[in-house]
Image: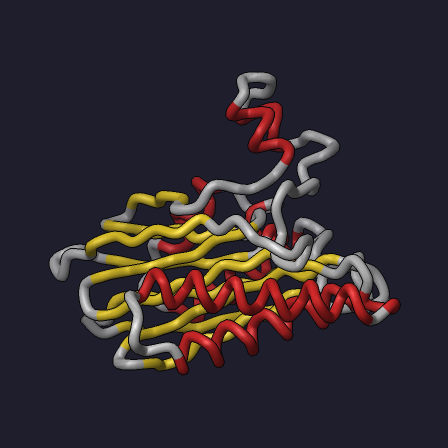
Amino acid sequence: MKYIHTSLSKTGQKRFDNEDACGIYDIDNGLLSIVCDGLGGNKAGEVASQLTLETIERIFRKEKSIDILERLKFAVIEANNIVHEKSSKEFELNGMATTVEVMFIKEEDVYWAHVGDSRIYMLRNGKLKQMTKDHSLVQKLVDEGFLTLKEAENHPNKNVIMRALGDGPTIDIDLSKQKLHAKDDLKFFICSDGVNAVVQDNELQEILGNNDLNFISERLSDLIEERGAPDNYTFIIIAKSK
């Protein structure tokens, strides 16, 4: 299967710097996509996200002798080691961390690694599914039955995350893979929380249903800006070629 893609990353209306980062790379006849949302003051989050992006792309491209999920895991672990070490040694970068979404599509398989509260979605035949679960305080409270999904939408601690790359010397990574079917109409959407914080899933499903990736990108950007773009927002859209 062949894929087309586009991406966008913008500084939010209430932010001075864009600490998000994203990249799409052709590797081994597959497509590697990465979205990071950096955390930490004084541009440290920007350093964390860029360093993670560059490290994962470099390591994944180099390590060809192991299983793809193991390649993803190894690349994310290496990025965590580098970000954590730099954070520990350089005072101005102390405490920096980042979320990370990594997805690799090859032939009829999709593989992904996830840390934090950025997200990966799949639109299959017009139906939207969130493929990752947020590593956030609010999601934990929902899982434990203390909050409903409706209450979680406007919870004051919705931006508190429980897991981030660079937070510590070790990292717990969600890893998974899925078989794809050539007959399905497929799109993938990878985003930082600056998108899903202001765009509801039903709206996202409707917008992603359009066949023009440039239209989707512009419509989402316009919608986020109309709603104040309180955070930086970044997304990658990948669609199976017709």
User: Is residue 53 in view from this perspective?
Assistant: yes
- Who's the residue at 62% across and 31% down the image? 138
**In the figure, residue 33 lies in which quadrant?**
bottom left
Q: Is residue 139 above or below residue 101?
A: above
Viewer-proximal residue, 105 or 85?
Answer: 85
Q: Is residue 3 above or below residue 40?
A: below
> How is this picture coloured?
secondary structure
For residue 20, side relative to residue 33 (left or right) = right
Classify the position of the N terminus by image quarter.
bottom left
Please report the residue visible at 29 percent of the width from the left and 76 percent of the height from the top: 65
Point out residue 21 in the picture as x, y percentages from the top left corner: 60, 70
Q: Residue at x 67, y 53 (%)?
A: 168
Q: Nearer the viewer, residue 167 or 12?
A: 167
Q: On the rendered structure, is 11 left or right of 33?
A: right
Towards the viewer: 60 or 224: 60
Residue 72 place in picture, x, y as percent: 41, 64
Side of 88 relative to 97 (left or right): right
Query: In the rendered view, does 214 fall on the left or right side of 2?
Result: right
Judge whether residue 223 can be spotted in this image: no
Residue furthest out toward the top: 145
Q: From the top left corner, tell me how far across and down residue 112 is, in percent.
A: 38, 57
Q: How many marks?
A: 0
In percent of width and height, residue 221 lies at 58, 62
Quadrant, the C terminus: bottom left
